[in-house]
Image (cartoon, rainbow, N blue to C red):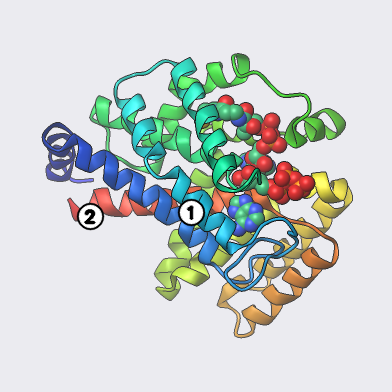
């Protein structure tokens, strides 16, 4: 980021704070919408398919995203004003209740409320500290400000699917992902997204390549919940094979993605954690892009 862009960023937060929080809120909701709009996501809800889900549709997700509007602005402001961990947590819990009201009780974006919420709080911290809004700085702020709180002060629900899978198989899940500052996104998935964008200029391809990379490396507790470790390893292998063969850079990549999609549906699997982290990747891309080049 150039010095003039950094000055602009500081100037904007001081001169137009509400416009900035609103802009971040819009970008986060857009990222969720981009994730939802991507077709042929294996096992996930897409515009033309409910994937492996019987209780939610594309409209359920649209309603869910609508219920999230404003939350990301609030979390960014909380980060900027150095709100304490309990305040951030209470807002996340409140937002989960709003989401469930909007979706008639269905869990659409529980993971995203947590992941993207903390990313926004970290963006607020960066703005307060005068740091450029890059993935590196945002992820570093997360670790510095909240790693200890996340690992020691967040009450774990022994009945959640994620915690049950951690107890049973010793895998890490959503809490560790945030507490470790989204290491896998900063160092692998976001660079993969940029690389694919640069090579193809195609947002759909970049999103699919990033999603497949996420599926290949993540201990996605949604997959484990429905299919155990055996299915987690199988789908990680399917995604790895796809990427090693060239991923979306192959001529017939769509046919291969559809084969993977069929496998997920046949085995009733859904990579909900990977979907959330695709939205996080897209959001970081949008933030880096907007704040480094547009201001
Ligand atoms: C802090 C919590 C997120 C605690 O999480 P916990 O460890 O208790 O696990 P879960 O409650 O099971 O939820 C975690 C959600 O995170 C996503 N996820 C899964 N694996 C990973 C991973 N490795 N890394 C990051 N994120 C991951 C995933 O969310 C998505 O899937 C949900 C849809 O799933 P669906 O297939 O419908 O599954 P279910 O309805 O659960 O079951 P079936 O249909 O299969 O029967 C959807 O939410 C996606 O977003 C996991 O679900 C949090 O629970 C918590 O404590 N919240 C309270 C608020 C709070 O403290 N907030 C902090 C401040 S913001
Ligand atoms: N598109 C999607 N389908 C199912 N679960 C999800 N969790 C987050 N996004 C999802």
Q: In the image, what residue occupies the spot 54% across and 46% down?
A: 102
Across and down, in percent, residue 104 comes to 63, 46
Left-right relation of 217 to 266: left
Q: What whole-number distance in Å separates the C-alpha atoms at marks 2 and 1?
A: 22 Å
Across and down, in percent, residue 33 comes to 47, 58
Q: In the image, what residue occupies the spot 76% across and 64% down?
A: 238
- Whether residue 222 can be seen here: no
Residue 91 or residue 8, whichever sits in front: 91
Does the numbered disc 1 mark a residue whose Cβ is under 8 Å from ligand 2? yes
Dividing the picture into quadrants, the one containing residue 114 is top right
Q: Are marks 2 and 1 in contact (CB under 8 Å)?
A: no
Total numbered badges shown on the rendered structure? 2
294, above or below 21, in the image:
below
According to the picture, the residue beneath numbered tag 1 turns out to be 32
Left-right relation of 39 to 130: right
| Residue lying at the far bottom of the rendered structure | 251
The quadrant of the picture occupied by the N terminus is top left
- First-in-chain label (2 vs 1): 1
Other residues around mark 1 within 10 Å, as few (<14) / some (14–19) / many (≥20): many
According to the picture, the residue beneath numbered tag 2 turns out to be 293
Q: Secondary structure at mark 2?
A: helix
Q: In the image, what residue occupies the spot 75% across and 61% down?
A: 52
Q: Secondary structure at mark 1?
A: helix
51, above or below 25, in the image:
below
Dividing the picture into quadrants, the one containing residue 80 is top left
Does the numbered disc 2 mark a residue whose Cβ is under 8 Å from ligand 2? no
Q: Quadrant of ligand 1?
A: top right
């Amino acid at each position: 980021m150039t010095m003039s862009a950094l000055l602009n960023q500081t100037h904007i937060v001081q001169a137009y704070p509400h416009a900035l929080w609103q802009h971040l809120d819009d970008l986060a909701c857009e990222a969720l919408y981009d994730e939802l709009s991507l077709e042929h996501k294996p096992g996930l809800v897409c515009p033309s398919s409910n994937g492996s889900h019987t209780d939610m549709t594309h409209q359920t997700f649209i309603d869910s995203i609508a219920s999230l509007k404003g939350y990301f602005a609030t979390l960014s402001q909380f980060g900027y004003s150095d709100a304490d961990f309990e305040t951030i947590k209470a807002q996340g819990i409140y937002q989960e209740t709003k989401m469930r009201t909007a979706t008639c009780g269905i869990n659409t974006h529980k993971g995203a409320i947590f992941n993207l919420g903390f990313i926004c709080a970290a963006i607020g911290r960066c703005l307060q500290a005068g740091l450029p809004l890059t993935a590196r700085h945002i992820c570093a702020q997360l670790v510095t400000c909240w790693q200890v709180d996340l690992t020691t002060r967040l009450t774990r629900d022994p009945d959640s699917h994620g915690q049950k899978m951690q107890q049973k198989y010793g895998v890490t899940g959503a809490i560790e992902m945030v507490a470790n500052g989204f290491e896998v996104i900063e160092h692998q998935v976001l660079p993969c997204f940029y690389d694919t964008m640069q090579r193809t200029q195609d947002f759909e391809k970049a999103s699919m390549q990033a999603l497949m990379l996420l599926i290949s490396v993540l201990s996605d507790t949604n997959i484990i919940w429905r299919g155990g470790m055996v299915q987690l390893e199988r789908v990680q292998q399917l995604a790895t094979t796809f990427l090693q063969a060239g991923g979306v850079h192959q001529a017939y990549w769509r046919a291969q993605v559809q084969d993977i999609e069929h496998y997920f549906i046949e085995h009733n699997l859904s990579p909900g954690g990977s979907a959330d982290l695709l939205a996080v990747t897209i959001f970081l891309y949008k933030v880096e892009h907007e704040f480094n080049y547009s201001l």
